[in-house]
Amino acid sequence: MRRRGAGTTPLAPGMRFGMLTLLEMEQRKGRRYWRCTCDCGAECVVEESHLKSGHTRSCGCYRREAPKERRLDLTGQRYGRLLVLGPAQTKDGDADGIYWDCVCDCGKRCICHKENLRAGNTRSCGCMQKEQRKKNMKTAIHFVDGTCVERIASQRTYANNTSGHRGVYRRENNRWRASIGFQGKMYNLGSFDRYEDAVEARLKAEQELYTPFLEQYGRERKESGKS
């Protein structure tokens, strides 16, 4: 048995389908169409089958307005240093919810993409990146006259050294060799029977080469205002 419903009930003026109210039926090429008035005030003509199936429920205003209602409102949300003030307007004056007007803790205003904010890709007007670059510059490796300042200033013994003191290596004949690198050159400090003598030679070379170089480098940076 067929169930009675919208598909079997004859349509008549005054009936409502969604936001549409039927006004008058029209025949077009053997098909029935209805002139309707929408709740928004506009009139439209809709095929009867589309009304019965629920395919058409407005003049089209619902499709235009529904996405706006579903938009995520980011106003007042905080993302890192950014406070969202409201949706940013596009060139045609429409606020589509894709770009948002934000103010950074530093006071600067900026326009940010919704997805970049929510994904955490944008967390400031750019001031965070500038600050990080300054920090990186302070800890960056500096080369002066072919010499890595950080390397010679470090007292760390590297993993490829097995003697326990940098610049000191054990030779095949069980003697100890000491060497030092400076300004792109490698200096052989000699071969020694005792480990302690090789270490002493290395330390003496560091005092003669590294210490004056590092002191001069520190003075120059201080004079130039760098810390």
Image (spheres, helix red, strand yellow):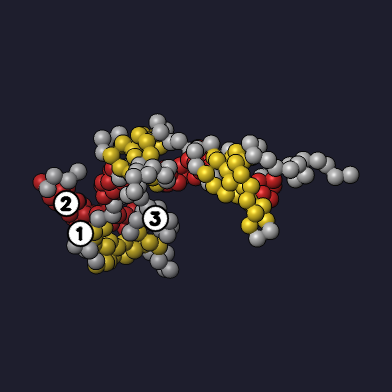
Say which element carries label 2.
helix
Q: CA distance from mark 3 to mark 1?
A: 21 Å
Label 3 amino acid? Tyr
| Sequence-first disc among 3 and 2 | 3
Residue 100 x/y as whole percent: 37, 41
Q: CA distance from mark 3 to mark 2?
A: 24 Å
Residue matched to label 1: 144
Instruction: Please report the residue visible at 35 percent of the width from the left and 34 percent of the height from the top.
Output: 85
Residue matched to label 3: 158
Q: Are marks 1 and 2 in contact (CB under 8 Å)?
A: yes
For label 3, count other residues whose C-alpha is less than 10 Å away and answer few (under 14), some (14-19) or many (20+): few
| Sequence-first disc among 1 and 2 | 1
For label 2, count other residues whose C-alpha is less than 10 Å away and answer few (under 14), some (14-19) or many (20+): few
Q: Quadrant of residue 81?
A: top left
48 relative to 147, above or below: above
Label 2 amino acid? Tyr
Q: Are marks 3 and 2 in contact (CB under 8 Å)?
A: no
196 relative to 20, above or below: below
- Along the line of sight, the residue nearer the viewer: 59 or 162: 59
Residue extending farthest left: 223
Instruction: Please report the residue visible at 35 percent of the width from the left and 59 percent of the height from the top.
Output: 168
Q: Quadrant of the N terminus?
A: top right
Q: CA distance from mark 1 to mark 2?
A: 9 Å
Q: Which disc is residue 217 wearing?
A: 2
| Sequence-first disc among 3 and 1 | 1
53 horizontally vs 21: left or right = right
